[in-house]
Image: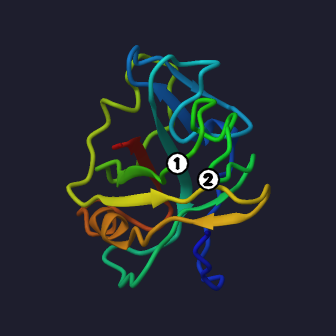
Amino acid sequence: GAQEHPERLPSFHMQRREDAAEECRDTGEVSFGSTDLELVTDPDTCAGTQQVGIRFQQVYVPHGATLTEAFLVFDVDEACRVGRTCRNAGRSDTALTDDLIVTIAAQSADNAEAFLEEVNNIAKRPRTLATVQWSVPAWEHEHDMVASVDIAPVVREVLERDGWSAGNSIVFLIRHES
């Protein structure tokens, strides 16, 4: 099930739909502005797997700040339970038997730029050396809030960059591993 974490401050939210993008790994085609993100397949737009980018603007955390933990939190759009056939839950209309494994990195940039509808706009962004793997659980109920694994090592690498300053933007990059 979903990991539960008490609310922590500061908290940052996506400000615009354009701050979330999906890129088909086979073609490099990028789309953004969707009402939801598919982790990691969307048969309506991509024959294979896709990677996802999420941008947070105006992150007011100072350079080198001590960060003990950090999470991405997702609002479940469609439930997908083990043993059922799922649609639009990033599972390609197939029966869900295992958790989905994704790797989360950040863009290795002082102030991550907005996404563009250009080929490989997500794939060509330099990634942090720090990454975490997340075994994404089945989405049990619509509108559950599901937290990722702790991504603090990824965020710390960005906060420690010489050019990072409070108010900059950070992009998280999520791709399928299994």
Residue closest to the eye, 95 or 21: 95
Residue annotated with mark 2: 82
Contact (Cβ within 8 Å) of mark 2 with mark 1: yes
- Residue that extends furthest to the left in the rendered view of this protein: 129
The colour scheme used here is rainbow
Q: Where is residue 178, by image quadrant? A: top left
Residue annotated with mark 1: 97
Decide if residue 11 is on the left or right side of residue 25: right
- Residue that extends furthest to the right in the rendered view of this protein: 142
Residue pictured at 37% horizontal, 66% vertical: 155
Check disc 2: other Cα within 10 Å, few if <14, some if 14-19, many if 20+.
Answer: some
Q: Amino acid at mark 1?
A: Thr
Count all numbered tags in the image, as a single digit.
Answer: 2
SS type, badge 2: loop
SS type, badge 1: loop
Residue pictured at 70% horizontal, 65% vertical: 145
Residue pictured at 41% horizontal, 46% vertical: 173
Q: Amino acid at mark 2?
A: Val
- Quote the CA–CA distance across marks 2 and 1: 6 Å
